[in-house]
Amino acid sequence: MTAISAFSSRVTPAQPVFQAKELDIASTSPDEKTLASTFAAPPDALTSMQPPLTNSVAWGAKSSDPVSSLMTINYASTSAAGRLRGIGAALLHRFDSDPGDFSQSVRQSSLAAPQGKQDTYDITLDVMAASGIKISIALKTTSNGLTVQVAGSDKLSEAERGALSGLAEAFQSAIDGITGSHKLDLNGLLRYDPALLASVDLKVDVELEGGKMQTLHFHADSKTRSLNSNGPDGNVNVSVDLSRLAGIGDDQQRQAGIDAYLAQVDEAARRGHANTALLATFKGVFTQMVGAPSANSAPSLAPRDLAQLTGLADFEASFSSTPLALNPKRPDEIDKFIYHVSQTTDIGGDSQFDRSISQTQNKRLDASFHESLSSGKPFDAKESMRTQSYYFKKISEESTSSTNISYSSGTLTRADKQDNTSGETSLVKYVMGVFKESSKTPIVESAKRDLVKDILGLD
């Protein structure tokens, strides 16, 4: 699943969403050819689309519906991505014609030879309709089974069913990213219809090889968006506040704001030696969660004031790698990376003529890592003293940037930006396991910029 990357770093090539009518029978295995030919059969042959219950495969229900037929084709796949290809979309497209609940399962019978080991994926999409009805769509694939279920849909209005069906490709894209490409794709789910749907939740539990667990929880409603992902490589967390949007800019300004934050993240990752897969996942999630437009209306600031802000909704975001003891000779030297960034915007006053605007950005980096003394070579310590020549570095740093603008009776009384950074870096050097030197360097930076000329358009 997404590598924390949000899911394990093991990458499986992404596979396209299955389209039955485009299946290349010539390139499939004999069993798949048979299934594909059956799937392409005329309507009067639908009863043969699902194989009969045999000693090797057992079905929860005998059915010729499109979802069961797709499960028939996918079940032989040796990967979760192949098993779930097109299934999420098919379950939501059921709402186009069938408002009822649904369940189906196919599993290897106890008499069959064991299949190859697969990671277990348990995926649930919970949607709350604006009417208060909760709909749950669940998919689970294991080494010996595939199960799907739709519950809570029997009382939905036609319009609500249409809104759910409209999420079909978005849900499938999220599934494909989790199981195949290992790049989370939440863009479609973030663009649900708020007039008909009140909230969207995606929950994923993955049992990886060796029993390690990977989890993800995504939530979106009219007031907040959040994503929390935890796994063997580390954690990613992003939360966006949609309740106060007076400082929201247009698409161009929001993109510029995201780019500025990502540049800071890249710099922190370079200095602190962040896990590259974890970094990529965080940047992708941050861009989607913070950058997606909101349907909420927002009071507008004067363009000259808005231009001094990031143009983004307030947020809190972080990612952290799993701590590692990489040196068997000194297990107390822990490699870690923790980065936290947040933004808070406050707008007060009774009118445009008497108001205050404050936007504060906070960043915090806490990292420690080993570096080989041999330039360009990775640190790879063993018990042998020949591998014990290295630097062990630590960085602890916190930065705050505050933009403040105030008006009284229509007159600009304050406009400035204050930046402060404090912290410390430390270094210890060993050669052939022998201590050679250590140092500590304080970090103290401060700057203030007057924004009056920028706001008033003065040279």
Image (cartoon, rainbow, N blue to C red):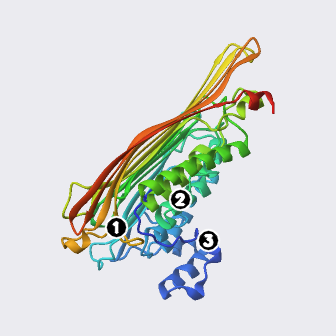
Label 2, label 3: how many angstroms apart (C-alpha)? Answer: 13 Å
Per the image, the residue denoted by label 2 is 88
Q: Is residue 443 left or right of residue 352?
A: left
Q: Secondary structure at mark 3?
A: loop
Per the image, the residue denoted by label 1 is 372
* Neighbourhood count class around disc 1 (C-alpha, 10 Å): few under 14, some 14–19, many 20 upward: many
Mark 2: which amino acid? Gly
Given this view, does label 2 or label 1 mark the residue nearer the observer? 1
Give the image quarter of residue 105: bottom left
Look at the image and tell me whether residue 2 can be seen. no
Quadrant where the C terminus lies? top right
Residue 280 percent coordinates (x, y): 50, 58
Mark 3: which amino acid? Gln
Q: Residue furthest top?
A: 409
Per the image, the residue denoted by label 3 is 19
Label 1, label 3: how many angstroms apart (C-alpha)? Answer: 51 Å
